[in-house]
Image: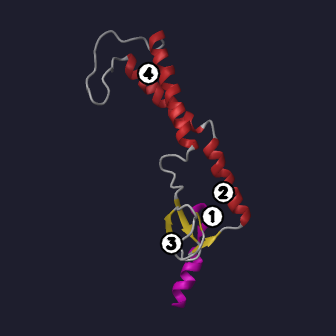
Amino acid sequence: MWTRKSEQEIQAADLEAEFKRTSFVRPLYWAIPIALLCTILYSYGYRGGITRGYVMYGDPITLLGTKSLFIGVVTFVILYSLMSITQRRGGLFSGDDILFCAECQEPSHADLERRCSCGGRQEPFSHFTWNEELETEEMATQ
């Protein structure tokens, strides 16, 4: 059975979500490896893209050469910017628009007033916890 967390737990969960949303480090975890991979592929001759599907073979550009470093830096800046913007807006798969009604125990998507069809107030899932003991007690009484 879903139960609402205490106010302290809700505040802690909200602070953690805010920290994740505004962190400068989290986009680095993705931008650095992807930019490095793109730079390595470019230095070994990949010039196609997904739709072209071919590799130009020839003299590989040195990995620490000026041209490949420039490609790596530009790729990193673009990726980091896009990932930072996406993270601050809530991410691609965050599920922030899915809320939970404490009254009828039903999930639904957010509307402007955050009201459920039953009349209850919708809140984020992070404000609730699943309590297995209450579920088994409720099943036993039925």
Residue 107 highlighted magenta (yes or no): no
* Residue contact at pointers 3 and 4, CB within 8 angstroms: no
Q: Relative to residue 141, is residue 61 drawn left or right?
A: left
**SS under mark 2:** helix
CA separation in Å, label 1 and label 4: 43 Å
Residue at 51% from the left image edge and 34% from the top image edge: 82
**SS under mark 3:** loop
Between tags 1 and 3, which lies in front? 3
Q: What residue type is labelled 2?
A: Ala
Q: On the image, numbered disc 4 is attached to which residue?
A: 39
Above or below for 15 versus 36: below
Q: Earlier in the sequence, mark 2 or mark 1?
A: 2
The overriding secondary structure of the stretch rendered in magenta is: helix
Q: Which amino acid does label 1 sit on?
A: His
| 10 Å crowding of disc 2: few (<14), some (14-19), many (20+) | some
Q: Which of marks 1 and 3 is nearer the N terminus?
A: 3
Q: On the image, numbered disc 1 is attached to which residue?
A: 127
The quarter of the displayed image where residue 49 is located: top left
